Image: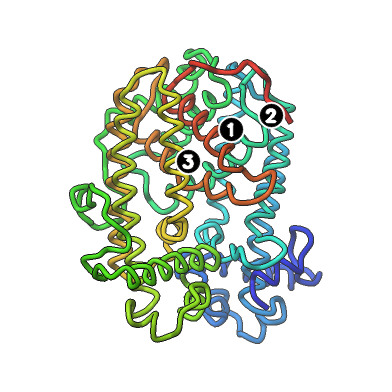
């Protein structure tokens, strides 16, 4: 049974193993803990049942008394982690532009980070359950739908001031940002910041995104010390990452796709290559790089086996071509954002225009961005390119955000991490049905979260309340 089949079969969150006695319960807990360690250290695909059994100190046969296979074990872990987060949503206290409102938000964000850390081995491998081609929905879509519905209700019930944001949109955006920021933190992409500084910066940005009228003293009384302490530290590269070059390694001008220097200028050939690239982007987005096959790509493109291998040696070569084009176009987009943010307030219209361009870009290269962010990568070259692009992007964001005047302490390193998290995660929820975001709504919520949370922009805000 695959992970996707496991989730399709299940109708609720919770463990699926049978009830056992006290000794059996202890053994089951040990298996779960051992599996978490293995998934964190080796990843889901590289972990075997034997690895888990060895970590626990039991035989493979003994493990099978509790779980059918590693897919069921991982599936139960994901459902348990999801259930813990759903329960946590119910504990979100009253929010608002007050010290108590900020306290409640700050505490809740810290608890969310704690749960994500508790199941680190699961969340680092979260993408393995995300298979959009499996009906009726992916686990991720079902979870986001359930969690965003609950969070939307809590936001609508607990909002203490007008925000001008729809509660459904705010909930989806907040979920995406929290998952991705904590994923960055777990992977060591902290840039010299402490966990407390990241939490303080995220809480501050979310507070202003939801409640732009919040007095600066509310933030100063709670988070300023941690932010100011970290502002004095020098910016560091992601911990544990070898040097992968600087922004100068990422090309700065767009080029035709497919590249005529590689594939020639024959219109028929270029059309075929473009079909293959489009098919690869579609299949990788639907199945993930690891699960996708050349046969899947050929089927999507409608070409023969020989046609595929005439232009690409394997699926890794196709992903590499997509990734190179993605890096070029992302660099060009990011460079434009620097100018957009430098315009000064009001900048909302130019920001929205840029966001529409970005959403279109995200749709085209979603499979590459997903491979980079989930580390579903093919070889060292792709890993190097992913980190090079990430480092170059946040450096540009640093420069763009540093020139903004704000009412409250703000560390641009946290802001850049949040901006990267928003751009990576929120558009990914824009392809499904309600309550997931449509293209127009994703631009609206991105503009609000970036403008209010990162730029301290209060111009043109609606005074309508947060709606359920």
Q: Residue at x 52, y 72 (%)?
A: 300
- Quadrant for the N terminus, please: bottom right
Residue beneath label 3, please?
422
Q: Extreme front residue here? A: 267
Labelled disc at residue 270: none
Looking at the picture, the colour scheme in use is: rainbow
Q: Residues within 10 Å of mark 2 (few under 14, many from 20)?
A: many
Residue 102 in the image, given as x and y percentages of width and height:
57, 23
Measured along the vertical axis of the image, is residue 201 above or below residue 300?
A: above
Q: Quadrant of residue 387?
A: bottom left
- Measured Cα–Cα span from mark 2 to mark 1: 9 Å
Residue 413 in the image, given as x and y percentages of width and height:
34, 35
Give yes or no for contact between labels 2 and 1 (Cβ–Cβ under 8 Å). Answer: yes
Upstream in sequence: badge 2 or badge 1: 2
User: In what element is the residue under mark 3?
Assistant: helix
Q: Residue at x 23, y 48 (%)?
A: 253
Residue beneath label 2, please?
93
Q: Is residue 161 left or right of residue 37?
A: right
Residue beneath label 1, please?
107
């Amino acid at each position: 049974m695959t992970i996707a089949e496991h989730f399709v079969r299940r109708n609720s969150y919770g463990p699926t193993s049978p009830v056992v006695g006290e000794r059996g319960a202890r053994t089951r807990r040990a298996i779960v803990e051992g599996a978490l360690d293995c998934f964190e250290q080796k990843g889901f695909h590289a972990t075997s049942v034997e690895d888990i059994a060895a970590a626990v100190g039991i035989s493979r046969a003994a493990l099978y008394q509790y779980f059918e296979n590693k897919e069921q074990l991982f599936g139960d872990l994901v459902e348990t982690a999801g259930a813990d987060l759903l329960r946590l949503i119910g504990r979100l206290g009253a929010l608002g532009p007050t010290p108590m409102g900020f306290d409640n938000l700050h505490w809740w964000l810290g608890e969310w980070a704690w749960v994500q850390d508790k199941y680190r081995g699961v969340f680092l491998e979260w993408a393995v359950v995300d298979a959009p081609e499996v009906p009726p929905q992916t686990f991720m879509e079902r979870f986001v739908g359930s969690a965003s519905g609950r969070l939307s209700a809590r936001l609508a019930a607990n909002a203490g001031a007008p925000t001008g944001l729809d509660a459904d949109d705010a909930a989806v955006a907040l979920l995406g940002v929290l998952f991705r920021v904590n994923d960055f933190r777990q992977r060591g992409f902290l840039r010299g910041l402490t966990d407390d500084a990241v939490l303080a910066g995220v809480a501050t940005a979310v507070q202003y995104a939801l409640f732009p009228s919040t007095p600066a003293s509310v933030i100063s009384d709670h988070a300023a010390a941690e932010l100011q302490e970290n502002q004095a530290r020098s910016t560091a590269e992601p911990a544990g990452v070898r040097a992968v070059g600087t922004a100068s390694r990422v090309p700065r001008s767009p080029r035709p796709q497919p590249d005529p220097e590689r594939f020639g200028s024959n219109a028929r050939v270029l059309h075929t290559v473009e079909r293959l690239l489009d098919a690869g982007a579609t299949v990788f987005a639907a199945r993930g790089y690891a699960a996708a096959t050349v046969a899947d790509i050929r089927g999507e493109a409608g070409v023969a086996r020989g046609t595929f291998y005439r232009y690409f040696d394997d699926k890794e070569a196709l992903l590499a071509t997509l990734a190179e084009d993605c890096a070029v176009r992302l660099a060009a987009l990011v460079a434009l954002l620097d100018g957009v943010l430098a315009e000064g307030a009001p900048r909302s219209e130019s920001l929205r225009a840029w966001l529409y361009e970005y959403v279109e870009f995200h749709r085209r290269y979603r499979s590459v961005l997903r491979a980079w962010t989930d580390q579903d990568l093919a070889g060292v070259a792709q890993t190097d390119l992913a980190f090079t692009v990430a480092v170059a992007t946040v450096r540009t964001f640093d420069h763009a955000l540093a020139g903004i005047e704000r009412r409250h302490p703000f560390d641009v390193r946290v802001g850049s991490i949040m901006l990267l998290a928003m751009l990576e995660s929120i558009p990914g929820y824009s392809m499904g049905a309600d309550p997931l975001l449509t293209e127009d709504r994703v631009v609206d919520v991105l503009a609000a979260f970036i403008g209010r949370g990162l730029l301290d922009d209060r111009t043109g805000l609606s005074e309508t309340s947060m709606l359920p």
